[in-house]
Image (cartoon, helix red, strand yellow):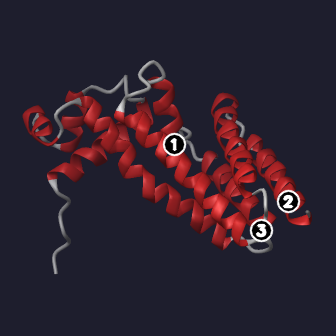
Amino acid sequence: MAPIEPSTRDRIVAAASKLFYSEGIRAVSVDAVAETAGVTKRTLYYHFTSKDELIAAYLDARDQPNLTLFKRWFMETEGPLPDKVQGIFRSLAKAARHPKWKGCGFLRTSAELANMPGHPAMKIGAAHKKRFEDWLRITFESEGITAAPKLARQVVLLLDGSFALVLLHRDPSYMEAAGEAASVLVSAALDR
């Protein structure tokens, strides 16, 4: 059986994802996305009415795969809850050592669109971060942590802060240090 070819729309989103992540959304033209996808600009605009819509599709396509990856890293980490949370940070630090790593696509996009809070991509990025926080909260609640909402928010702050510092310094040990801090917070919450 022949492999299923991706749709034209999917090829455009894949090309946009590659270019936007590696070069930034403002640095990449619609022409470059169309060329990389192997379509005409007219075809691109048939599927996306604007570059803004394409940017939103790029982030939307990253949402579930990123959440699934974080959950997988959590589940694959041996040990109690604090170790599992720290495992997410360790896995991210390992990913950050790859030369093509450019940080969090959601945070980088939000930085580029900081003056456009109503942009569809900003809403998608905020929803993605909230889904991750909610998953942490539910995970913490299932372990009997009473201050689960606060703890989930603290872990998200450590995670996103470490993304920023690793990108700035090109030093994944910031992510590892944030993971150690997250583990301490989770341990303290379990001891209450």
Q: Identify which amino acid the numbered label 1 is placed on.
A: Lys
**Label 3 to label 2: alpha-carbon separation:** 11 Å
Which numbered marker is on residue 81? 3
- Quarter of the image for the C terminus: give it: bottom right
Circles 3 and 2, Cβ within 8 Å, touching? The answer is no
173 to the left or right of 103:
right
Tell which tag, 3 or 1, sits nearer the viewer.
Answer: 3
- Look at 73% across and 58% down and name the residue there: 148
Mark 3 or 2 closer to N-term? 3
Q: CA distance from mark 3 to mark 1?
A: 30 Å
Distance from label 2 to label 1 (Cα)?
36 Å
Q: How many tags in the picture?
A: 3
Quarter of the rendering containing residue 145: bottom right
Number of the label disc, if any, that sits on residue 189: 2
Q: Give the residue drawn at x 39%, y 43%.
A: 59
Between marks 3 and 2 in the image, the one whose residue lies nearer the viewer: 2
Point out residue 116 in the picture as x, y percentages from the top left corner.
41, 22
Q: Which residue does the numbered mark 1 point to in the structure image?
A: 100
Secondary structure under tag 3 reads: helix
Is the residue marked by circle 2 packed among few (<14), some (14-19), or many (20+) residues within 10 Å?
Answer: some
Q: Residue at x 54, y 61 (%)?
A: 69
Depth check, mark 2 against mark 1: the one in front is 2
Are the residues flagged by discs 2 and 1 in contact, CB closer than 8 Å?
no
- Give the amino acid type for the residue marked by disc 2 in the picture: Ala
**Kind of residue at disc 3:** Leu
